[in-house]
Amino acid sequence: MKICLVTAFPPSGRQLNEYGFHLARELQRNPLVDLTILGDELTRYAWATDKDGKTLAGEQEELPGFNVVRSWDSNHLWNPIRLARTVRRLKPDIVWFNLVYSTFGTPEHPVAAFAGLCSPVLTRMLGFFTHVTLHHILEHVDFAGAGVKRERLFRLGSEMATRALLGANSVSVLLSGYRRILLEKYAAENVVLGTHGTFSICPSPPDYSVRDNPDQRMLAIGHWGTYKRLETLMEAFPAILRSRPNARLIVAGANHHTTPGYWESIRDRYGANPRIEFRGYVAEEDVPELFRTTSVVVLPYDSATGSSGPAHQACEYGVPLVSADLPDFRDMAADENMAISFYKTGDAGDLAQQVIGLLESPLRQRQAAEQNYAAALRMTMPNIVRNYLRWFELQRRRQSLDISSRPRFRSYWRPSSVRSSLSVLPPPAAADRAQPPGLD
């Protein structure tokens, strides 16, 4: 099977580059797959911030072992034409898009963003089977909280973009609530339910001997400044420290590309506290040790834009979670059977109480860790990719039999005896049983 994967891809630092890498790495392992990555253009140099706030620069080089064609760039109007030309030259069996709405353009360049999101339907019109993995839908995005101006105009544009994306042969979303919206609001017939998955091939069970030894580490990690913000966590930490004197807060990650200077402003304000450690950029090889020694991962979001990557990393290493009480994360916890303690969004006192409750109870920590680790075992990247490939092969066979020029999508991915496909879900509620349950 010849696949073109359209995604941001390392050493690019754009959104979803890490997810694209892990998809590509797993596809590369399959001897029956001939993979070409249609990646974003690289600038000559990349920048990162170390734990002292110093800027690190290095020339960007392609990762060895991958066939990467740099065929699009953020904020460029001609991306659909460039991608179409590349796809026609390569003639793949499958064109797989790994997307968020801002993949092809930032909010400052909405026309370029919209044009890029028309690429899947254009690729389908050229006769290629096209699938989109869509990591969020904008109906759930708090535009005001994300600093987006002209919200009504963006809402209208996002609806048009969603309809364009639904012109692909099939679309997978990662939360059941997203699928319900696309079915009900857009009358979509080609939407299937996937899961984010964990990046490990075989997660290692949690090692409790390296936790709470001697510090009870809290970890907050991400790209900060838009919907992921640190103010509530910083306000809550003194109360946590009074109750748990051996607590230590580790803040890892960097600024979101639209909020330069945010991470540094928080570090400058709170960095004098010896119990708070600002790590900045964390190299890939250092991520496992960071999570293994963590007692609890905190998701201090003001709003959500889809399934959480840090939450899935926490599951991969068997770490308990404390999260803002957001509908997306409630869906994620229910869909994937994660153990998450929720606090009222923006309430520092409630956040402190939820963290203290976990840190005071070794039994609760162990139960949450084991539940999250069990969830990770059900959604490893090999399982995720294997079931995508099953889906693609099924659709190729349908097309070869010429069953329908516009295939309808039913519950091909959820045999009654198998619940570990692309997503792990509880049995659907009665109100949902009439709808096709998706990719599981």
Image (spheres, rainbow, N blue to C red):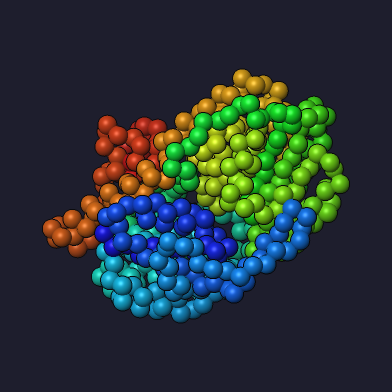
Q: Is residue 198 at least partly visible in the picture?
A: yes
| Image position of 6 with respect to 77: above or below | above
Image quarter (top left, top right, bottom left or bottom right) of the C terminus: top left
- Residue 339 in the image: x percent, y percent? 54, 31
- Residue 105 in the image: x percent, y percent? 54, 70
At horizontal 67% and vertical 41% (from top left) the residue drawn is 219
| Image position of 354 with respect to 290: above or below | above
Residue farthest along the left direction in this orientation: 401
- Residue 65 in the image: x percent, y percent? 42, 61
| Image position of 279 with respect to 416: above or below | below
Would you identify the image quadrant in which residue 292 lies? top right
Relative depth, front residue between 145 and 68: 68
Horizontal relation, residue 46 to residue 408: left or right: right
At horizontal 55% and vertical 42% (from top left) the residue drawn is 313
Would you identify the image quadrant in which residue 166 lies? bottom left
Horizontal relation, residue 169 to residue 312: left or right: left
Q: Is residue 330 at least partly visible in the picture?
A: no
| Image position of 372 with respect to 31: above or below | above
Residue farthest along the right direction in this orientation: 272
Relative depth, front residue between 166 and 9: 9
Relative depth, front residue between 202 and 188: 202
Residue farthest along the front direction in this orientation: 64
Image quarter (top left, top right, bottom left or bottom right) of the N terminus: bottom left
- Residue 30 in the image: x percent, y percent? 32, 52
At horizontal 31% and vertical 61% (from top left) the residue drawn is 34
Horizontal relation, residue 286 to residue 33: left or right: right
At horizontal 80% and vertical 26% (from top left) the residue drawn is 243
- Picture mark count: 0
